[in-house]
């Protein structure tokens, strides 16, 4: 074996080792965090946690039922705002690829994706809280929805582009209008992928705290009204975690565990869908 | 045969479809413009008072009414770039491992674990940071040899909280995003490319290197995506960075970022000038985000351009 | 068509999403079984959060149709949101300034609710004794002028204590806070240099140190950093079991914060309580008076738009100032002197309830 070949093999081996080390390196903090959170959180997870409201300081027990419901409502609102706008915009960008509006949308979506969540919170505070002189679930849903839009637009656009042109040509050949072709044929083909996009976007916003601080505020009572402040898991966990009470700390870890579980479920479902999509489209 | 009108539709097509879908689509750039407008309008008092000096003043004094964004800009850029330097190699390593090197049985579990890293909310990272990372960093700082402490990069008392702790946690948070996108990119490289390389006797690294080159635009995009996440990260950073608006080169010094100061002081600020100054910081953050976004697009375009330039020249079959 | 394995995941996801959407819609639309309870939103200081949360919970038990939702976002936040009218009442450890009162859309009244103390906490491994701090010493530490624990100024007041030669790490609040206001108010009184260099506000330009978020953030940082000194409300020091020092009073004795010493600080102020209750009781003269004490106030509009909520709030205040006070001691707060309560009763009558 020549010297050159040996050198190349050694370099290659080093790189492989580095990559394996990188994986291990990334898993270390993961293990740490999970061990920490779940270790503290699981013992505090009981039926009361899911069914009771927060108790005041000094009274042990209580739960985060209102925060769990609040988070569900907030992401429901966010999805309600973002999914229609996101999918329809994605359709436009995919169908009318070359127009300047499409380029503008793509560029804006990228920017919107990068805007820090706290800036979006500021925007939602100024537009949805101040003029109405109240903190509300809607304002929180708006802030989260704005964050979801770029992800859904991009995902929809990419998936619609992936649909084989033969499908579109076939529909058009059969006399369908463009609208009909898109909505009946192409969209159904792309639907699993779009759902993936929605799930990914949901996973992204479910863990947000900062934008909710100035919009949904927080609420220690059970509330499902859209025009009132509403509790959320993230804000509640934060409030409890920075308090000086051990009982609240335990509940904070429990809340964090529930949160991680929910986000993980969304992510996993999204990934499973992507795999199925790949199997479908592999030639 | 078909002409495309201003909305992009071909002749003979209904008007309703492009109009309706276009109406939804136009909301997206309107939203971005709206955010910029609101930020600008709500920071007018501060803009009029300080002008461009706001970007280069280092004082942040709510009592005296003196505000300058420089320490926060510094802290944001320094912590994010450091986190980028730390996370990009690790993320790429993971991406390469998952796409090229890992045994098939390990692949799915490892992907799952990477997803898990991304699923952890930032407050959890912040709390873990306070209880676990900060004491570790403090021990590291205490263990720094005296001769090294003379270097500006390492000077300062061993507090634990500071730029290093914040950058480390940012790096951990960036890794899953960059790794997952980079992995998708590497997966999308046609297998013919790799197969060709191996057929020519390339080592594993050489084949991977070629795949990296092929997908370099996407990989740069992946790295920039991670950077974007770091710039806007709020909760985890404010818990670990020490919240001190001073410009310092030292990794051990407590510093402050734009997102952190907004989160800490926005609900409190009762004075109109103070409030507007905080919103102006939001505006600065927004503009910096846009600038980095544009920069990454230019980078991607320039790096990708070389391919098309070379495409005209005759190239040997397997090399790129 | 039979359900294949490949169908399950997308079907499951679709079901999950639809279920989520339905749950959200149902939760919103399903009308409550009981009469729609009135919710009153308030925001402000973190310091009284423990007792306010207790009060609102107890009051809700007595009056299930009255829900008072209080979020502790900081004193400045309370003032801000009250002025913007996004909340019905505010709460603050520092009274509103004249400028802030001018800026509000209506006349705002201050109502003291409880008393509390801000204590200097520290972390000195190896030092078990309780440290004594003179006001000027604290001011110089927070100005960054005294940088070592072994400094003469500290040693002078602590004879016999083996102070290490290590650096002092100052910990202050990163977020705007009434606790900071009270602390700065005291330091400004004892140190003219502190008054001119730093000033008194909920957010100041700290000359030295690192910032923690919330009382808990400061407590946490001090606990974890050997050689650190910070300031928190008494209850946080007690809950976190952190060492805190005694402070030199106006009369010259070193007083440790406690319910009694904080109450004593109020006693001197009640004699000349201003009509709007905006009084600072830091550095008050008297025996066994803790110098860094303060009232905390609830802020109410004289004539809010919602008169029904106004009546409910006034009723709550009457309860809080009488029955509510008995919860104070357990949670580390000093109850109000009776003279102050009587004055407040009279003032509450000025609030328009119809």
Image (cartoon, rainbow, N blue to C red):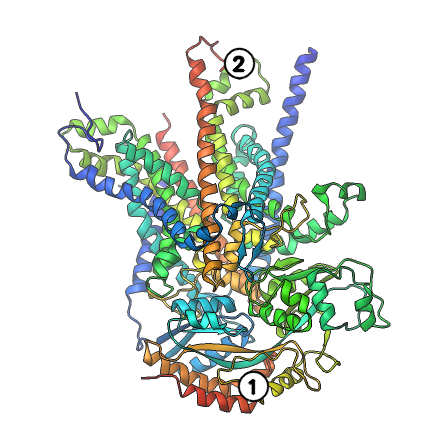
* Labels 2 and 1 share a subunit: no
Q: Quadrant of residue B153?
A: top right
Q: Is residue B203 left or right of residue A121?
A: right
In-image side of B181 versus A36 (left or right): left
Is residue A276 at least partly visible in the picture?
yes
Characterize the local packing of mark 2: few (<14), some (14-19) or many (20 or more) Cα atoms within 10 angstroms: few
Tag 2 residue: B199
Residue B294 image position (x, y, % from top left): 44, 34
Up-down relation of residue C213 to residue C6 (above or below): below
Q: Residue at x 35, y 53 (%)?
A: A78
Chain of the residue that carries numbered disc 2 in the rendered image: B
Query: Which of the chains bears the disc numbered 1?
Result: C
Q: Name the residue beneath numbered marker 1.
A: C336
Nearer to us in this view, B296 or C95: C95
Where residue A190 sits, quadrant-wise, is top left
Residue positioned 17% across, 20% down in the render: B1
**SS at badge 2:** helix
Q: Position of residue C164 (x, y in %)?
A: 82, 62
């Amino acid at each position: 074996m020549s010297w050159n070949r040996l050198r190349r093999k050694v370099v290659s081996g080093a790189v492989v080792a580095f990559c394996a080390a990188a994986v291990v390196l990334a898993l270390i903090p993961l293990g740490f965090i999970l061990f920490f959170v779940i270790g503290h959180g699981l013992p505090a997870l009981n039926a009361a946690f899911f069914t009771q409201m927060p108790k005041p300081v000094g009274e042990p027990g209580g739960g985060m039922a209102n925060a769990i419901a609040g988070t569900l409502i907030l992401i429901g609102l966010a999805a309600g705002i973002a999914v229609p706008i996101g999918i329809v915009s994605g359709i436009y960008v995919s169908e009318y690829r070359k127009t300047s509006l499409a380029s503008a949308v793509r560029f804006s979506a990228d920017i919107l994706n990068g805007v820090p969540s706290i800036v979006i919170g500021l925007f939602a505070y100024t537009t949805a809280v101040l003029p109405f002189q109240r903190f509300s679930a809607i304002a929180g849903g708006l802030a989260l929805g704005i964050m979801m839009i770029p992800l859904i637009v991009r995902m929809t656009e990419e998936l619609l582009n992936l649909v084989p042109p033969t499908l579109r040509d076939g529909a058009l050949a059969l006399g369908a209008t463009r609208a009909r072709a898109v909505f009946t044929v192409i969209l159904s083909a792309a639907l699993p992928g779009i759902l993936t996009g929605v799930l990914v976007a949901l996973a992204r916003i479910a863990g947000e705290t900062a934008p909710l601080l100035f919009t949904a505020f927080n609420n220690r009572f059970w509330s499902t009204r859209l025009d009132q402040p509403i509790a959320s898991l993230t804000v509640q966990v934060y409030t409890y975690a920075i308090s000086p009470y051990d009982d609240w700390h335990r509940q904070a870890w429990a809340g964090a565990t529930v949160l991680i579980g929910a986000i993980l479920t969304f992510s996993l479902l999204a990934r499973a869908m992507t795999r199925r999509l790949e199997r479908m489209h592999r030639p | 045969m078909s002409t495309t009108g201003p909305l992009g539709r071909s002749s003979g097509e209904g008007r309703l479809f492009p109009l309706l879908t276009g109406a939804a689509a136009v909301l997206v750039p309107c939203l971005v413009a709206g955010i910029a407008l609101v930020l600008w309008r709500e920071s007018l008092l501060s803009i009029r008072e300080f002008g461009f000096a706001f970007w280069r003043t280092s004082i942040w004094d709510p009592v005296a009414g003196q505000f300058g964004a420089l320490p926060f800009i510094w802290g944001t850029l320094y912590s994010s770039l450091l986190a980028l330097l730390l996370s990009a190699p690790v993320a790429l390593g993971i991406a390469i491992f998952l796409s090229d090197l890992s045994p098939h049985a390990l692949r799915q579990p490892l992907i799952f674990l990477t997803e898990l890293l991304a699923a952890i909310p930032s407050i959890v990272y912040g709390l873990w940071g306070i209880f676990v990372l900060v004491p570790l960093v403090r021990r590291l700082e205490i263990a720094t040899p005296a001769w090294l402490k003379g270097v500006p990069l390492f000077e300062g008392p061993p507090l634990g909280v500071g730029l290093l702790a914040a950058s480390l946690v940012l790096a951990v948070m960036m890794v899953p995003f960059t790794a997952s996108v980079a992995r998708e990119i590497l997966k999308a490289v046609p297998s013919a490319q790799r197969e060709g390389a191996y057929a020519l006797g390339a080592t594993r690294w050489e084949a991977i290197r070629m795949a990296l080159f092929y997908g370099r635009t996407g990989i740069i995009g992946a790295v920039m995506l991670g950077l974007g996440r770091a710039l806007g990260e709020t909760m985890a950073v404010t818990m670990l960075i020490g919240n001190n608006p001073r410009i310092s080169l030292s990794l051990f010094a407590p510093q402050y970022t734009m997102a952190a100061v907004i989160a800490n002081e926005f609900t409190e600020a009762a004075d109109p000038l103070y409030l507007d100054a905080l919103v102006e910081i939001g505006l600065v953050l927004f503009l910096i985000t846009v600038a980095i976004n544009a920069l990454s697009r230019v980078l991607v375009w320039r790096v990708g351009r070389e391919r098309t330039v070379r495409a005209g020249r005759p190239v040997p079959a397997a090399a790129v | 068509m039979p359900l294949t394995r490949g169908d399950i995941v997308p079907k499951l996801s679709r079901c999950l999403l639809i279920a989520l959407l339905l749950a959200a819609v149902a939760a919103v639309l399903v009308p409550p079984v009981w009469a729609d309870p009135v919710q009153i939103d308030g925001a402000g200081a973190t310091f009284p959060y423990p007792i306010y949360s207790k009060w609102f919970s107890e009051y809700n038990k007595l009056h299930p149709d009255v829900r008072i939702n209080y979020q502790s976002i900081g004193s400045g936040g309370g003032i801000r949101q009250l002025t913007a009218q996004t909340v019905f009442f505010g709460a603050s450890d520092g009274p509103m300034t004249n400028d802030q009162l001018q800026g509000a859309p209506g006349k705002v009244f201050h109502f003291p609710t409880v008393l509390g103390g801000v204590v200097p906490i520290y972390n000195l491994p190896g030092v078990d004794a309780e440290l004594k701090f003179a006001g000027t010493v604290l001011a110089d530490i927070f100005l960054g002028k005294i940088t070592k624990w072994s400094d003469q100024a500290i040693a002078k007041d602590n004879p016999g204590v083996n102070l290490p030669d290590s650096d002092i790490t100052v910990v202050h609040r990163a977020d705007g806070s009434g606790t900071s206001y009270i602390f700065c108010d005291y330091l400004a009184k004892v140190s003219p240099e502190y008054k001119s260099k730093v000033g008194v506000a909920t957010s100041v330009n700290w000359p030295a140190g690192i910032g923690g978020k919330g009382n808990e953030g400061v407590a946490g940082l001090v606990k974890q950093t050997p050689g650190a000194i910070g300031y928190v409300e008494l209850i946080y020091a007690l809950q976190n079991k952190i060492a805190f020092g005694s402070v030199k009073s106006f009369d010259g004795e070193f007083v440790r914060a406690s319910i009694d010493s904080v109450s004593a600080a109020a006693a001197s102020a009640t004699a000349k309580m201003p009509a709007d209750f905006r009084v600072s009781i830091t550095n008050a003269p008297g025996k066994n008076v803790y110098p860094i004490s303060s009232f905390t106030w609830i802020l109410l509009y004289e004539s809010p738009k919602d008169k029904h909520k106004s009546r409910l709030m006034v009723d709550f205040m009457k309860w809080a100032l009488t029955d509510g006070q008995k919860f104070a001691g357990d949670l580390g707060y000093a109850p109000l002197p009776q003279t102050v309560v009587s004055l407040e009763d009279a003032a509450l009558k000025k609030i328009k309830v119809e």
